[in-house]
Amino acid sequence: MPPAPREKLLEQVRRACRTRQFSLRTVEAYTGWIRRYILHHGKRHPTQLDSQHVAAYLTHIANDGAVSAATQSQAASALLFLYREVLRQPIELPHHILRPRRQKRLPIVLERGEVARLLAELSGSKRIAAQIMYGSGLRLLETLQLRIKDIRFDTNEIVVRAGKGGHDRVTMLPHAVQPDLRRHIRSVAAQHTRDLERGGGRAPIPPALARKLPSAAHELGWQYVFPATRQYTDPRTGERTRHHLHESALQRAVAEAARSANLGKRATCHSLRHSFATHLLQDGYDIRTIQELLGHKSLNTTMIYTHVLNRGGLGVRSPLDRS
């Protein structure tokens, strides 16, 4: 049987990723690395290549591409996935691959006053999103992928679905953000009603749920808390669909707010999450509780925030609510 053309191969990769419920970002990253790997080797089909070719490519991107250790590791994972899960030709990587050194860097943490100044430079839905990243410790995509049903005003909680590593967790919903967030959700609900009236009103939902409950995609609870400004036509269903706000829009807004606030630091969306963890530690909350709120698999990851001694046995209160 002749090798499949490159387009068909990449579609096989996408299908294998979807079967394993990889995130859209992972699918895009994996197909991108596989495409570049094929181009690097003169468009030869991967079945004509072996582990030595993979090693040569990984060394190339480390040496000539000057990528980070994490980026090279992602490329290696993509190629191993290609051979093991798609082509069914398991390979083992040689030990002589040139690997960039992983540099340990302390996170950029904002002082409480700096957080307040940054938030003051934001407005509308982007300010609410930034408040949630700082007040609840969410990652950028976790914030943008929130659904209306995951906001629990009655228990002051946010349910984070399929966070990093595919795990669910619960964190606090700060009281300080709730009035604006309620008004924002009412605005989103009104927009959803208009979308339904115009033949749209669909949000992307997990494939398994779409098969079991096809109507769920049009329900208000499944709409994104921070929806995109425009709808698009889903090529698989042909329906008008509204995705969440693109991460670059919030990243730009936070970066511009940091510059306007004259922080003198390269503050990013993730800096707000770092500040959440550090300020909770400074307030004496237990490191393991903070680990659960952040969704860290290992306590060692959370230990980077240990700037002060820890005290346990306290009920957790969001740093956004601290006056």
Image: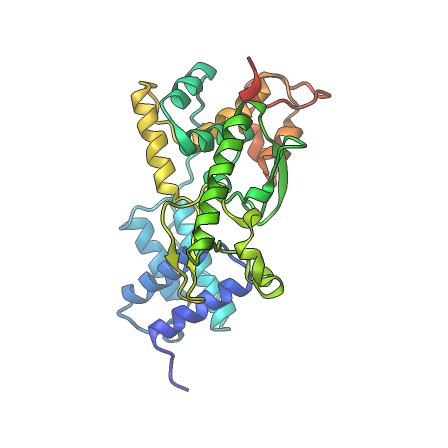
Residue at 46% x, 33% y is: 129
Residue at 41% x, 35% y is: 103
The spot of residue 291 in percent (x, y) is 62, 33
Can the viewer see residue 84? no
Q: Residue furthest front?
A: 197
Q: In this rendering, is residue 287 above or below 29?
A: above
**Residue 101 located left or right of residue 185:** left
Quarter-wise, where is residue 44 in the image?
Answer: bottom left
The spot of residue 257 in percent (x, y) is 34, 26
Quarter-wise, where is residue 154 in the image?
Answer: top right
Identify the coloring: rainbow
Q: Nearer the viewer, residue 201 or 167?
A: 201
Q: In this rendering, is residue 169 above or below 260?
A: below
| The N terminus, quarter of image | bottom left
Q: Residue furthest right?
A: 313
The spot of residue 265 in percent (x, y) is 35, 22
The spot of residue 68 in percent (x, y) is 37, 44
Q: Nearer the viewer, residue 102 or 296?
A: 296
Quarter-wise, where is residue 214 in the image?
Answer: bottom right
Q: In this rendering, is residue 299 above or below 14?
A: above
Q: Nearer the viewer, residue 40 or 240?
A: 240
| The C terminus, quarter of image | top right
Q: Residue furthest top?
A: 323
**Residue 258 located left or right of residue 322:** left
